[in-house]
Amino acid sequence: MMKTVIIFASSHGTTARAAKMLGEKLGGYVTIVDLKKTNLPEIKDYETVILGGSIHAGMMQRKVTKFIKLNEKELMTKKVGLFLCCMHEGDEANAQFELAYPEELRNHSIANGLFGGEFMFAKMNFIEKAIIKKVKGVTEDVSKLDENAINEFSTKFSASVV
């Protein structure tokens, strides 16, 4: 049985929900690791690695980018999937994805996914709320988490690791 680890960082819970949904769809032996709650995992014990993060103020969480830098060589020996949670769609979302993950890793990846995003005002601090109100004109919770994109990613990833 293939051992998969889903490694992510989640600021307000959206990426955590996406990782959990993905883990349930993949089935088999799946470990889910939130870098904000756990020490850096050893990926040598896994055949497949899925990395996920979200965009805040135009950047992915530092914990994910740091993890990638620390494990760059090892990641290139694994079957890797990459996903991103963000509120942009189309070309803007693709541009954020390209900024979030190094080109070499994107090219090595067997599945990439844009899973949509959410604005969760109850979980934001004052500054985050002010920025979202000013930039997006949004003042209440918005969910654009894309379950179809998670399903498509799961299907493509699973087909590539058989």
Image (tube, grey):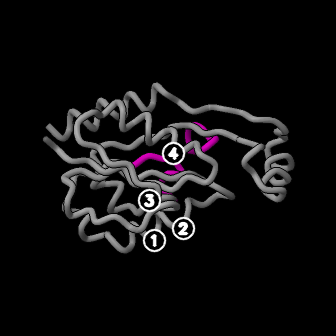
**Is residue 148 one of those drawn in magenta?**
no
Q: Secondary structure at mark 1?
A: helix
Residue 159, x across and y down, in percent? 21, 33
The residue to which callout 2 is attached is: 62
Numbered disc in front, either 2 or 3: 2
The residue to which callout 1 is attached is: 66
Numbered disc in front, either 4 or 1: 4
Q: Amino acid at mark 4?
A: Ala
Per the model, the C-alpha gap separating discs 4 and 3 is 18 Å
Relative placement, left or right, of 52 versus 140 is: left
Q: Secondary structure at mark 2?
A: helix
- Within 10 Å of disc 2 (Cα), the crowding (few <14, some 14-19, many 20+) is few
Relative placement, left or right, of 137 versus 103 is: right
**Which of disc 1 and disc 3 is earlier in sequence?**
1
Residue 116, x across and y down, in percent? 56, 37
Residue 13, x across and y down, in percent? 59, 45
Relative placement, left or right, of 24 versus 79 is: right
Per the model, the C-alpha gap separating discs 2 and 1 is 6 Å
Per the model, the C-alpha gap separating discs 2 and 4 is 16 Å
Q: Amino acid at mark 2?
A: Arg
Q: Secondary structure at mark 3?
A: loop
The residue to which callout 3 is attached is: 101
Numbered disc in front, either 3 or 1: 1
Per the model, the C-alpha gap separating discs 3 and 1 is 11 Å
Q: Amino acid at mark 3?
A: Tyr
- Within 10 Å of disc 4 (Cα), the crowding (few <14, some 14-19, many 20+) is many
**Is residue 96 one of those drawn in magenta?**
yes
Which residue sits at x=43%, y=34%?
21
**Which of disc 4 and disc 2 is earlier in sequence?**
4
Residue 72 appears in which quarter of the rendering? Answer: bottom left
Start-end of magenta stretch: 82-99
The residue to which callout 4 is attached is: 16
